[in-house]
Amino acid sequence: MNIAEVADAAGVSSATVSRALSGRGSVSPRTRERVLAAAQELGYVVSQAASTLATGRNRNVGIVLPFLDRWFFTQVLAGAQQRLMGSGYDVTLYNLEGDGTERRDVFETFLLRQRVDAVIAVSLELDETEVSRLHALGKPIVGVGGPIPGIRTLQIDDYAAARLATEHLLALGHTSIAHIGGNEASDADFHMPVKRRRGFVSATEAAGIEAARFIGADFTMEGAYRAAKQLLGAPDRPTAIFAASDEMAFGAILAARDLGLEVPHDVSIIGLDGHDAAEFFDLTTIAQHPRSQGALAVDLLMAELEDAPLPASTNLPFELVVRGSTARPRL
Amino acid sequence: MNIAEVADAAGVSSATVSRALSGRGSVSPRTRERVLAAAQELGYVVSQAASTLATGRNRNVGIVLPFLDRWFFTQVLAGAQQRLMGSGYDVTLYNLEGDGTERRDVFETFLLRQRVDAVIAVSLELDETEVSRLHALGKPIVGVGGPIPGIRTLQIDDYAAARLATEHLLALGHTSIAHIGGNEASDADFHMPVKRRRGFVSATEAAGIEAARFIGADFTMEGAYRAAKQLLGAPDRPTAIFAASDEMAFGAILAARDLGLEVPHDVSIIGLDGHDAAEFFDLTTIAQHPRSQGALAVDLLMAELEDAPLPASTNLPFELVVRGSTARPRL
DNA sequence: TTGAAAGCGCTAACAG
DNA sequence: CTGTTAGCGCTTTCAA
C-alpha cells in the first residue's frame, strides 16, 4: 500500500495525494475530499521512512534520561510524550541506566542515526564529549531539570526552593533544623543536591542559626530513613528536618514514627518535589510540576521545529504546600 | 555526510561501504578496514530513514503501555529497552494515559506509520477493534502482563501466585484472612485482579475457611491504606491480609501501624510483586521479575525479526520471599 | 570481491 | 490547481 495506489484510486497524481494528505500546497476542496476518501478506504498511512528521507524531518524526538524508576523522570517523560503525541510526534526513549555501555552507545551511535528531530535531556550531567556530541547533532535540544553547558535548560530555582522550605520551618519557630541531602555519589552526578543544600545553608545562616546539621543520603526513601534515624536518635535531635526530595521525606517520616516520635509535634518534616504520594503522607512540601516541565520543553522544541508560537513563559513555578507534617516546635 | 563521502574517502563504491558496514555480503578484510577507518574518521553513521526505505526494516520497536507511573510498567519498559538497545534497536514509547484521544491516536495512526518492526504491549486489555488493528499490522507482537486474544503473552500465573501467597498465611496458622484486591474499575480494565482474587478464594476454600473477607481498592498505596483501615478497625479484624500488589501492601502496613497494631504480631501482611521498596518495608511478598519479563519479550521478538535463537524458556518464575511482615498469629 | 544501477515511497520544485 | 520529475540515502541484484 503506497501513495501511488491512493493516487490511482482517487484518479489523481501522487503529488496531489501528498499535498492533500499533508496540507502543504494547494488542492481543490473536491480533490482533497476524493483523496481523503480513497486513503481512508484503503487504510493508507504515509510511510515515515520515505517521508523522512524526502523531507529530512522525522516527526520524532528523543528523550534521554538517567533512570526510569524515579518519580521525577517518569513525570517529565509522561508530560513530554503526551504533548508530543498531540503534535503527531513519536518519542524515542533513551534510558542511560546500566553499566555505561548504554550511555556510550546512545551518544556515539543512536543519536547520530538521524532518527530524531530534536532531543530532550532530562536531569543529565554530561561530560564535555557528550555535550559536544549533542551540539554536533545540530538539532534543537532542551534540558529539563539539570543544566547543560550551552543548552537551554528548564529547571526550578533549586536554591530558592530550598530556601523557601527552610524558611517555612524558621517561620514556625524552629531553630534546630537538619537537612537530609545528597551524598557524595549523587553530588557528583547532579548539581541539584548541592544547590538545594546551599539554599538550606543560606536560609539558616541568614536566621543566625549556626547549629544547622546536614546528613547525606542517596535520594531513596530507605537511605533517608537511615539518615533520619541518625539525626533523630541523637540526644540533641533537631525539631525539624528538611529533606531534599519527597521520597527522602517519606523515609524521614517513617523513621520518626519508628522511633516513637510524633510528626509534627516532636519533629516537623518538609520535603521538596510535590510527589504524588505526598498527600497520602500528609507531607508539607515545595511542589514543582515535572509533567508541565516536560510539556513546556516540547513547546519550546515545537517553536523551533514547526515555528509554533513560543510559550508565553518559561518560568517554572514551585510553591509551598503546607500539610500536616510541619508545625511549631513543642516548647 | 552520506555513504558516498565515505566511499570516496575509502576509495571504493558506496555498495562496498554498505556491505562493509552492515556485515552483509562479502568484503575483503583490507577493504573493510579502510571503510571502517574512513567511516570512523568522518563520524559517519547510517541514516536510518534511508536504510529503512531500502530494506523495510526499522530497527525500532514500539512499546505500548497504559501508564508510566506504576512500578511494574516502568520495570518492564526498562528491561525491554535495555535489551533492545543491546541489539541496536530503538524503542518508541506509546503511553496510553490520558483522556482516550491518546489511545485512539496510537491505534489508528501512530502504529500504522510503519515505524516499528514489532510491538510489545504491556498490561493492555484491548477491545476487538484494537486487537484486529494490531493483527493487521502484520508484525510480531508480544504482550507482557496481560493476555491479548490471539497474541502470545508473557505473564506469571496470577492465580497460582495468589494461591501461594495465601497458602503461606495458611501454613503459618492463620484462619482469619482478608484480601485487598481490585475494585470495579481495575477489574474492568485488567484481568489480573480477578485472577489473583480467584487464587485467594481457592486457597482459603481449600483450607475450609469460609470467613475469608475481600475488599476492593484501586491498586494504590492510599486506596489500600483506607481499605486496610476498614478491615483492621472492625471488631472481628483478620489476623492476616493478602494484598494483591506490594504497593497496596505498603498501604496496609501503614494502616496497621496507625491503628496501633503491630506487624506481624497483631496482623500479618503479604504482598505480590517484588517491588523494590519491599525490602525497606520488610514485606513478605511473592516476587515476580518484570525487568526480566521485558527482556524476555525482546528475545522472543528478536527470534522472529533476526532469527536469533529462541529463548530456552518462556517460563515466568515467581517465588515467595519471606520477610518480617508475616508470622504465626498471636494466640 | 567489487561496481553500476535500479529501486524503496515520498516530497518539492517546476511547468503548465 | 495539478502533473511531471528529480532526488532524499541506502541496499541489493546483476555483471564483471
Image (spheres, coloured by chain):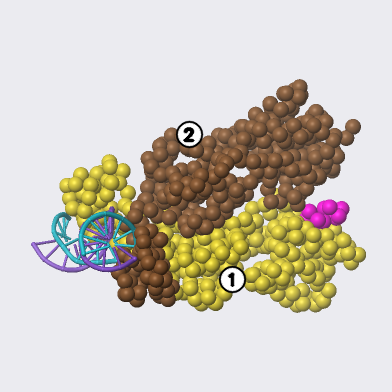
Chain colours: A yellow, B brown, C purple, D cyan
In the image, taking residue B305 as reference, residue B231 lies left or right, namely right
Q: Nearer the viewer, residue A152 or A28?
A: A152
Q: Nearer the viewer, mark 2 or mark 1?
A: 2
Place of residue A199 in the rendered image (x, y in percent of width and height, measured from the top left): 70, 73
Disc number at residue B230? none
Which residue has dot 2 on it? B149
Q: Residues within 10 Å of mark 1 (few under 14, many from 20)?
A: many
Q: Quadrant of residue B178?
A: top right
In the image, taking residue B42 as reference, residue A150 lies left or right, namely right
Which residue has dot 1 on it? A125
Residue B175 visible to an observer of this rendering: yes
Q: Amino acid at mark 1?
A: Glu
Tell whether position B200 is magenta.
Answer: no
Segment tinted magenta in the rendering: A253-265
Q: Amino acid at mark 2?
A: Pro
Q: Nearer the viewer, residue A197 or B151?
A: B151
Q: Nearer the viewer, residue B305 or A320?
A: B305
How many marks can you see? 2
Chain ID of residue with mark 2:
B
Q: Nearer the viewer, residue B151 or B256?
A: B151
Relative vertical location of residue B328 with respect to residue A52 in this rendering, above or below: above
Place of residue A91 in the rendered image (x, y in percent of width and height, measured from the top left): 46, 57
Q: Element type at marker 2?
A: loop
Chain ID of residue with mark 1:
A
